[in-house]
Amino acid sequence: MAMRPVSRFAIKISLVGGLTLLLISPALFFNYIVDPYGVFHETPWFHAVVPNERFVKMRYLVHHPLLYDSLVFGSSRVNTLDTSHLHGGTWYNLWANSATPEEYLQDIRFLLAHGMTMRNLLIGLDASSYILSGEDHQHELPSIMYPKDGHWLNVYATYLFTVPDYGVVKEAFYPRERIVYDYQHTGRALFVEREQALISNPAEHVATFKLPMAGPAPVDVNERIRRTIQAMADIRKIADERHIHLTVFVNPVHESLFHTTLFSPYRSFLKQLVGITDYVDFSGVNSITSDKGRYYEYSHYRPIVGDRIIASLFGTGATTPGFGFLVTRATVDGHLANLEQEFK
């Protein structure tokens, strides 16, 4: 039986398809093997460039729901809280870049639904908790959510077929800094080289300390605050119903960043928060927040500050006078008045 000749259209389609595959195959290889966002391999083969912390850590906890019973939530600022210094449970630091209380709530509900038993929740908040929104970054590759609806194909296809830019490729093979991602133990990212450089030459660090620039508040700041407070109220409700011990604190950003914060919405946020729960406020101007040597830059404090936060919250070590104020409904007005004086 004679074979039918291949049409020119079929040949063109094959050529176009083959050429397309040839062009994207390096991207497929890079995205899967190098895995710059850490989503394909639980044990990375290469240095992750911008790991999707929330995705990677949520996957780990879902696969190991019985390993931990206590969680730290917050943005990248709480990364320096050393879980080995926390007691009363088996702790995991679930910090994620630019994460918000609405996202903490989603993760808490999801982990509870997947068999995790929670004894303790430790949540760090600050102005970014209401300035930022999960909706602003949930479609960015470093921040795509762990697929709670089972749509794995869409998520992995996005990571696999996106052509990486030059900066990502360069960072994968020539990283500016080696960071230890301890996501299968503590949940933390360890800046070993940065710490060593800072300890060996503190004067240079202080001299090159970057100061912040004031940014605009979101146009819907009051709505953002309302949603953030509602998320915290829902977390409080879950904690009460399930007998989970909830501890809330306010992060101590460097005083230079504190002074760029729009105080009116910040005061409103702190005032409304105390209606949900007592909290310890480490922000403002004090001996810690005015010391550049205790910060990597104006936004992120070092582990030595994280240790002081833990000591103040749980009485597990040396505390710093004037660092950390317990805010209750009875003390909030006086505290906010003091903060306003420090802000001026």
Image (cartoon, rainbow, N blue to C red):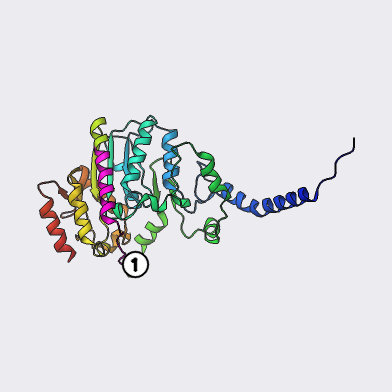
Classify 10 Å Cα crowding around label 1: few (below 14), some (14-19), many (20 and above): some
Residue 324 pos. (x, y %): 18, 51
Residue 139 drawn above or below residue 286: above
The residue positioned 42% from the left and 33% from the top of the image is 64
Residue 204 visible? The answer is yes
- Left/right of residue 163 with respect to residue 231 in the rendered view: right
Quarter of the rendering occupied by the C terminus: bottom left
**Magenta extent:** 211-236
Kindly identify the residue that appears in the image at 13 percent across and 59 percent down.
338
Q: Is residue 287 visible?
A: no
Residue 277 or 65: which is nearer the viewer?
Answer: 277
Q: Amino acid at mark 1?
A: Lys
**Which residue, given by chain and number where applicable, does mark 1 sit on?**
210
In the rendered structure, the answer to whether residue 278 lies left or right of residue 207 reads left
- Residue in the foreground of this view, choosing between 132 and 223: 223
Q: Position of residue 3 (x, y in %)?
A: 87, 39
